[in-house]
Image (cartoon, helix red, strand yellow):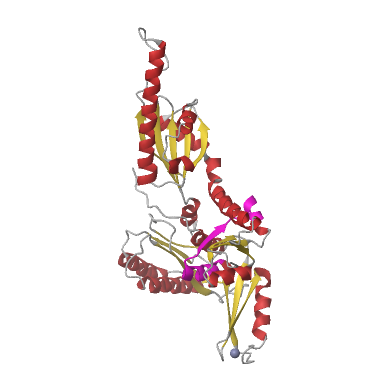
Amino acid sequence: MGKFALQKTDSVKLYKIRKILDELSQKTGRGTELISLYIPNGKQLHEVITNLREEQGTADNIKSDLTRTHVVDSLSKVLQRLKLYKKTPERGLVIFCGALPPEGGGPLGSEVVKVYEIDPPKDLKTFLYRCDDHFHVDILKDMLKDENLIGFLAIDAKDAGWGLLHGDKIEVLKETGSGVAGKHRQGGQSAKRFQKLREMELTYFYNRVAHISKEYFIDIYPIKGLIISGPGPTKEDFINGNYLEYRLQNMIIDTIDASYSGSEGIREAFAKSMEILSDFRMVEEKKIIEDLFKHINTNTGLAAYGLKEIINFLKNNVAKLIIITDDTNLHRIEIKCKKCQNSREDFSERPQLIPKKTEMLNSPCPNCKSTDSVASTQDIVDYLALLASKTGTKIEVVSGKAEHGMMLSSIGKMGAILRYNPNQ
Ligand SMILES: [Zn+2]
């Protein structure tokens, strides 16, 4: 049985990684020159550094001058970055590096070497070095697929099995017989007495199943959801009898009618549960958004929406939770006066970003009238996350395409739950 590193879902971090991967997936090199490097925790950095130096030596044989320069420069840049680490980070490290054309395109030779460092969302297991005409992003993409542990229980009156889903891997944890007599009594026993004995045995079995479930799914592998399967009505009797610890009882996502119980039943239920599970994060998101709208609709004073209001509440440590869709496309523009350091900000969607920035740069500083300013831009989620990190505010990035995400879109794609009613 494998060991799992349990990590909490961090939707902001996943959003950022997704953005980078989307960007990198679209990049192609002029030649075989884009570097992908995956370093698992167990790998010594000095070994990797030695490897890369050897690669640099081999790169001298590349025929095209431009490609050779790009590869050598990229490898130097990766080496520089690696030297900043004392040891391999806890979950490993992923670096992508390559010479990429400037934004908006450019002539041959105008490429700039860019490097992307990613702290993987969970333990990286594989070492990979590739120099190719594209970036190898699949390992990270796979890591993004799963964020939750889901428990499986396959039960009928004969036996029970426990399983765990982590990513797209199912693991059978345990199987046990029930010891409960079959439905048909042997000769010489009264029907009534047989029935009573059988019920006692079942109750004993259910309690044992509940106990083992708690051990596995609360103590050892804290799950986020539980699927209960099995043939016949046993699973319903078990659920309706409230044998499970209340936390697990509340985590039941669904039941599945199946032909088997025990370990065979776990595999069967897993195969049948794919659709339920794809909706699971969706269910979580839906709850969060429904909570927001409950506050809005009943005027509790504990909800806010509107970008400027939310930022204001965030800066003043009034916001407890920020909810934002993953498709706002919003960016923050900051203009800083070089003369007096006065700073101005505004927000813009991607298509208007550059004209807006130019317009702001061209208007004089409201403080000293200087027109000598610098501009910087950042993704809205990055900016909110930066503010939130100072106040301990949580941020949830939710899917904008799902039904509940569209609800959020109706109030500007973001909302906040507040720590207290600011108007009281
Ligand atoms: Zn100024």
Compared with 76, 305 (above or below) is: above
393 is within the stretch colored magenta:
yes
Rendered location of residue 110, percent (x, y): 56, 77
Lateral position of residue 181 relative to residue 142, left or right: left
Q: Residue shown at 37%/32% (left/top)?
A: 207
Which of the pair 76/353 is nearer the observer?
A: 353
Say which quarter of the image contains residue 358: bottom right
Q: Residue shown at 38%/10% (left/top)?
A: 190
Rendered location of residue 50, percent (x, y): 32, 68
Compared with 94, 76 (above or below) is: below
The single residue placed furthest to the front in the displayed view is 424
Can residue 281 be seen in the rendering of this structure? yes
Lateral position of residue 133 relative to residue 106, left or right: left
The single residue placed furthest to the top in the displayed view is 188
Which of the pair 367/201 is nearer the observer?
A: 201
Can residue 336 be seen in the rendering of this structure? no
**Over which residues does the magenta segment extend?**
381-407
Q: Residue shown at 46%/54% (left/top)?
A: 143
Q: Which quarter of the image is occupied by the N terminus?
A: top left
Say which quarter of the image contains residue 327: bottom right
Which of the pair 186/11 is nearer the observer?
A: 186
